[in-house]
Image (cartoon, rainbow, N blue to C red):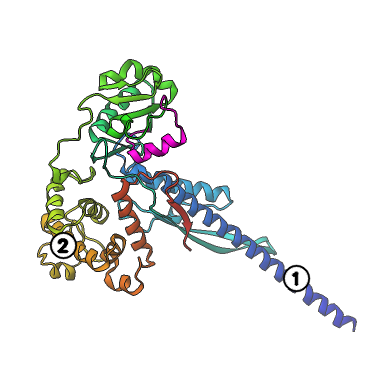
Amino acid sequence: MLVALAGAAIVLLLFAGVLGALGKALLGRGRLQRAADLAAVSAARSMRDDFPRLFDRGPRGLSKAAYLARARTAAIEAARANGAPMRAGDLDFPETMSFAPTRVRVSIRSEVAVGRGPGGETAVPALARAEAEVGGTGGVLPLDAEGGGYSGPLAYRQGRPMRPDVAAAFDRMYAAARRDGVTLVINSGYRSDAEQAKLFAQHPDPHWVAPPGHSLHRYGTELDLGPPSAYGWLARNAGRFHFVQRYSWEPWHYGYGLNPRSAPRLPERERAIPTFVPSQYVGTIARAAMRWNVSAALIAAQLYAESNFNPFAVSAAGARGIAQFMPGTARIYGLANPFDAGASIDAQAHLMRDLLRRFGSVSLALAAYNAGTAPVEACGCVPGYPETQAYVARILGLMSGAGALPPDAGFEVRLVS
């Protein structure tokens, strides 16, 4: 009887030891997974915050390499802060070939303690994976100003819209200020009458906020600049760059004095062409847009997303040229040479005309361009392919604001696996 009890006690102790080791292993793996999740989310947050700077041609703009490097650093720091050793090779961006990746994938490999063996702590290999993406496109600022005041293309500096000639002048002034140890910050640029009405409703004092239809900001020439430490420099130097202080009681408000209230002198058909389009393709896009009755901004944003305006691009899937036509689709649209940029842009506009007629929605037409018509028809929606969803979101963002997303734009970060 005593022997049996002793044997049972030994079995219970062994079982308790196994459970303890299993519990430690699960706890360790859970901590590793949490670190991977936080690393992925941290990288995606960095990408969300920096996304507008990819489209900023001013001094705050980022190259794609810098954009990805900042996201990588954020992920590594988050993983280490949560006790997981992470190396640069543990992170990759599934859309690296895109001009603006929005997805990040983290795979952290480490050892997890499971118990004590004859030589001390015993550890086993463990792997934690997480993937995050940036999504959402609502509430963005326009590529083109319309309505009262200035009507024409907008350029962005520090995420703020303005006339392109004003942006060029600001670049020169910004560079001069930096040489003097002063960093200029743009707090406001072009404002539509609708935006001005909202602002006036919040602060109905015409001494500080002009009523809608009366603000100079509607002309795309006005900049509200800071910080306050820069006011002295601006008062002494802004005139050299044709900026004038508009009101004595507003040391931050400067307006561009050349060509007041005028639009850049572009041919009428080319005014809707976004400023990120290389000059050699402006006329081609304008002609294709007119021929097929498709938005020039839509065509331009697609070309940017598809190939970054590279007429000789070839994808891993075999898509070719500036508009990334697959051979079968190229034949259907009579495109003999996908590397002929002019012919490809015309065929792209033709295809988008057909897709827009078929699906009656820009989002669905874009999804069909990327994923094919069958999956779009099957669900009547943008299919749940991460690549297609990111493609549609990216182009809509370009069309509506060159990536200049305000904080409340719904440009969210989420884990996807």
225 magenta-colored: no
SS for dot 2: helix
Query: Is 9 positioned to the left or the right of 54 in the image?
Result: right
Specify the amino acid type for callout 2.
His
Residue 128: x percent and y percent?
A: 52, 61
Residue 356: x percent and y percent?
A: 24, 63
Residue bearing mark 2: 350
Say above or below: 11 vs 168: below
Q: Residue at x 39, y 67 (%)?
A: 384
Q: Residue at x 39, y 52 (%)?
A: 138
- Please rate how many residues cluster around mark 1, counting C-alpha atoms within 10 Å: few if below 14, some from 14 to 19, many from 20: few
Q: Residue at x 49, y 60 (%)?
A: 130
SS for dot 1: helix
192 magenta-colored: yes
Quick check: can you spot residue 339? no
Quadrant in the picture for the N terminus = bottom right
Q: Residue at x 48, y 54 (%)?
A: 40
Give 26 or 175, whichever is nearer the viewer.
175
Say above or below: 256 vs 45: above
Q: Nearer the viewer, mark 2 or mark 1?
A: 2
Q: In the image as oriented, which residue stretches furthest toward the right?
A: 2
Give 341 or 202, whichever is nearer the viewer.
202
Residue 265: x percent and y percent?
A: 15, 36
- Please rate how many residues cluster around mark 2, counting C-alpha atoms within 10 Å: few if below 14, some from 14 to 19, many from 20: some
Query: Is 14 positioned to the left or the right of 325 in the image?
Result: right
Specify the amino acid type for callout 1.
Ala
